[in-house]
Image (spheres, helix red, strand yellow):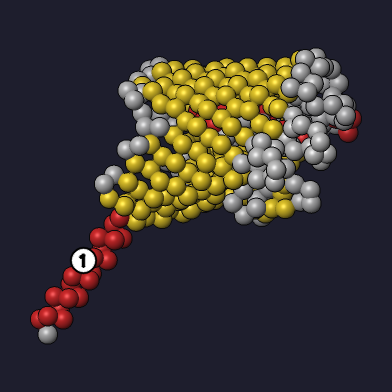
Amino acid sequence: MKKHIIAMAALCACMSAASAQTSVTIYGIVDAGITHVNNDGPNGGRTTVEAGQMQVSRWGFKGVEDLGGGLKARFGLEGTLLNDTGGAGVPTGNPSTTSLFDREATVGLTGNFGSIDFGRQNILGVLSVGMADPMGLAFAATSPNVLFAAMNHAGVYGAYGANGSGTALRQNNSIRYVSPSFSGFGFALMRAFGEQAGDSQRNSYVGASAFYNAGPLNLYGAYARMKNNPTNLAVSPDLLHSHAIGVKYTMSRAVLKSTYSENKLDSTGRKISVFGAGVDFPVAPAITLTGAFYNTRRSGDVKDDSQQYIFITRYALSKRSTAYFSYGHAATDRIVSATDINLAQGFVSVGSDSANRLTVGVMHMF
């Protein structure tokens, strides 16, 4: 009898040790608000309820297993939530398909050597402009840094890289390495494979980035090159070059942030650049004010320019819930045409050259 008790105790101890070495977390963000745009094209103003205003609504799973000796296995699965309609995932491609985990689907290892992950994941430019974005990646559907700097505009960048005709912001079939920090300095390398027979360069992505995180100063920089896959195999793939830098400086009473990016297409010389600057200013323990400015410019083939001014007030209801109010103004140098690239996509409508936006909403994290 004593032997059975000892055996059971040993088994329970082993199970406890195993469970202590492995963890799986379910997490997410549910964000929605009411928005009014005063000049939504020739038809006038428009009022809508939108999901993912302050942060994109999402849900996901992440897990880690301690393998010993400082080595850990990990995975991440994350998908978009469209909680204004109850939908999930973002349709991409032609014919259209919706991925359950459209934001991330990775598995990898992490340890003293850094980390290496395989699957669908963000491009390295997101680490540069994202960490220093003047709005903290708020209003992703209309943010110049998300649409152009991070290449989340499917109509402009969807053909480039291994993204399944979605947006170049995330790449399928990729491998990414991130180094450990060396006194604040580090770097990352990433490659996404187009998996096209006879030419591995078609629909491919290659990127590199460097960063510095020490004390109040944070610096980020990234470079990438992507290729498309012309339907005529006799035609060489077109090449897209991307550069992005970000700077964040934390002061006692404010956080200053600035970013710059440019993406240039070899075939036409088209270049789209985005400059952003902003400040976070806590005015009370639960209240933070944010002011941001963006200038988006097209050159090389067609000249165009757009500006956005955004003001945000965030009120922390708790550690996980935030209420927010925002005012935004956007203007373009010319009337937006249905046949051209809209540098104020999602903000200024076709037939207009400016718009004002008011938003009130709530964000909850779990």
Asked whether 164 or 50 is in front, the reply is: 164
Q: Where in the figure is residue 287, as x and y percent of width and height?
A: 47, 29
Left or right of residue 355: residue 215: left
Q: Residue at x 71, y 27 (%)?
A: 239
Q: Nearer the viewer, residue 109 or 135?
A: 109
| Rendered view: 353 above or below 102 | above
- On the question of residue 304 being in view, the answer is no
Residue 133, relative to residue 295: is it above or below?
A: below
Q: Nearer the viewer, residue 55 or 288?
A: 55
Q: Residue furthest bottom?
A: 1
Relative to 315, residue 195 above or below: below
- The residue located at (56%, 42%) in the rendering is 174
Query: What residue would you read off at disc 1?
Result: 13
Q: Is residue 299 left or right of residue 213?
A: right
Q: Kindly give the residue lying farthest to the left in the view shown.
A: 2
Relative image position of residue 270 (x, y in whole percent):
76, 20
How many labels were placed on the picture?
1
Residue 75 visible in image: yes
Determine the secondary structure under disc 1: helix
Quarter holding residue 304: top right
Q: Amino acid at mark 1?
A: Ala
Where is residue 285 drawn, in percent x and y? 41, 29
Identify the image quadrant of residue 217. top left
Residue at x-position 68% and y-position 18%:
273
Residue 194 is drawn in which quadrant?
top right
Residue occupying image coordinates x 80% and y 33%: 235
**As drawn, is 189 to the left or to the right of 250?**
right
- CA neighbours of label 1 inside 10 A, class few (<14), some (14 to 19), many (20+): few
Q: Quadrant of the N terminus?
A: bottom left
Query: Where is residue 300 shown, x and y percent of the image?
Result: 77, 15
